[in-house]
Amino acid sequence: MEQNGIAAIQEEIVEEFSLFDDWMQRYEYMIELGKSLPKIEEQYKTDDHLIKGCQSKVWVHAELVDGRLVFTADSDAIITKGIIAILIRAFSNQKPADIIAAKTDFIDQIGLKEHLSPTRANGLVSMIRQLKLYAVAFEAQLES
């Protein structure tokens, strides 16, 4: 397994979340993660970069740098910003094919989905789907 491969990063995230006793602490940690989110440039805060299916506004931009997909994002809601920060930490700076193949069961391992409102849980699924769609699009570019 690659040193900073997706599975290794996901394992780190699971370990970090296991350090907290209750969900209030985990939410606070997610908010902190959101503050360290690689910020999207203002020019990408457009409808084209909005993730459909999220109650909050979440903008994601992806670009290919040296064969790896680099994500930046922002959200108008602090918890949502934390959620996208977790996903970007797992998937940014990875090869598109690895992102496409990556499992996302680490989300269940940290108990995130079950502690989100149904609309936020749907938003989480939409965020994962959008990151993977970017990976599919860039993988197709690499192959052509």
Image (cartoon, grey):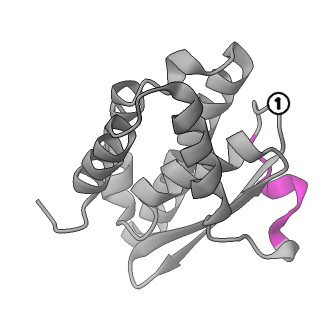
The residue lying furthest to the front in this view is: 21
Residue in front for this viewpoint, 6 or 113: 113
Which residue does the numbered mark 1 point to in the structure image? 55
Q: Is residue 2 left or right of residue 121?
A: left
Residue in view at x 40 percent, y 73 percent: 68
Q: What stretch is highlighted in magenta?
A: 44-51
Residue in view at x 42 percent, y 32 percent: 107
Q: Quadrant of residue 54?
A: top right
- Residue 67: percent from the left, percent from the top? 38, 78
Residue in front for this viewpoint, 125 or 143: 125
- Residue 100: percent from the left, percent from the top? 38, 48
Q: How crowded is mark 1: few (under 14 residues within 10 Å), some or many (20 or more)?
A: few
Q: Quadrant of residue 9?
A: bottom left
Magenta stretch encompasses residue 2 = no
Residue in view at x 65 percent, y 49 percent: 31
Can the viewer see residue 16? yes
Magenta stretch encompasses residue 48 = yes
Residue in view at x 39 percent, y 31 percent: 110
Q: Say if 9 sits above or below 51 in the image.
A: below
